[in-house]
Image (cartoon, rainbow, N blue to C red):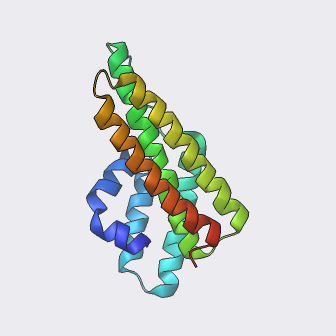
Amino acid sequence: MVAALAGSCPVEIEEVLDRIGAGEAGRLLSEAQRAQSAERRGKLAACLAVLDKTVVAGGQTHKGALPRFGSRRRDLASRYGDLALCALLASLIDVELGGEPEARRARFARAAMALESHVAAVREGSAGEVEATEAEIRRAREIFARVGGLVRTGGD
């Protein structure tokens, strides 16, 4: 699962991880894709540790005041979206590694909380694009529901 995801959009994943201050996780994930089985597990475990630390800390904050409130909403929506993706990636890595069910559920809960914060910020800043915004939200929730199924079953 993680290999397919990382192989299909590595640049996008690395950009998201860089934006929230988890660039090292992107490097480790890339290295894991090229590594042999035992080394791959070690790289994925290290990547998971970086992701967990970043998500728990709420990502890296960007300093500087934003000029308008609308920009602040878009920035918050983007930040929460990045955190949700980061936590979702951590959940998928944990499923692949066969981690503890309780830790997996906690990771997924953090991803879901970040997603709902993202949804709230997107809705506040959507200004008339309600239909497109709601379609995007539905797609994101569908993806989260699929990953949630994997988290609950442990990838079986």
Q: Horizontal and vertical percent for residue 10?
A: 30, 62
Residue located 47% across and 59% down the image: 89
Residue located 44% across and 28% down the image: 121
Residue 27 appears in the figure: yes
Closer to us: 47 or 2: 2
Q: Horizontal and vertical percent for residue 30?
A: 36, 68
**What is the residue that sits farthest to the front in this orientation?**
131
Closer to us: 107 or 140: 140
Q: Horizontal and vertical percent for residue 142?
A: 45, 54
**What is the residue that sits farthest to the right in this orientation?**
102
Quadrant for the N terminus, please: bottom left
Quadrant for the C terminus, please: bottom right
Residue located 67% across and 54% down the image: 106
Q: Is residue 126 left or right of residue 114?
A: left
Residue located 31% across and 13% down the image: 67
**What is the residue that sits farthest to the top in this orientation?**
68
Q: Horizontal and vertical percent for residue 69?
A: 37, 14
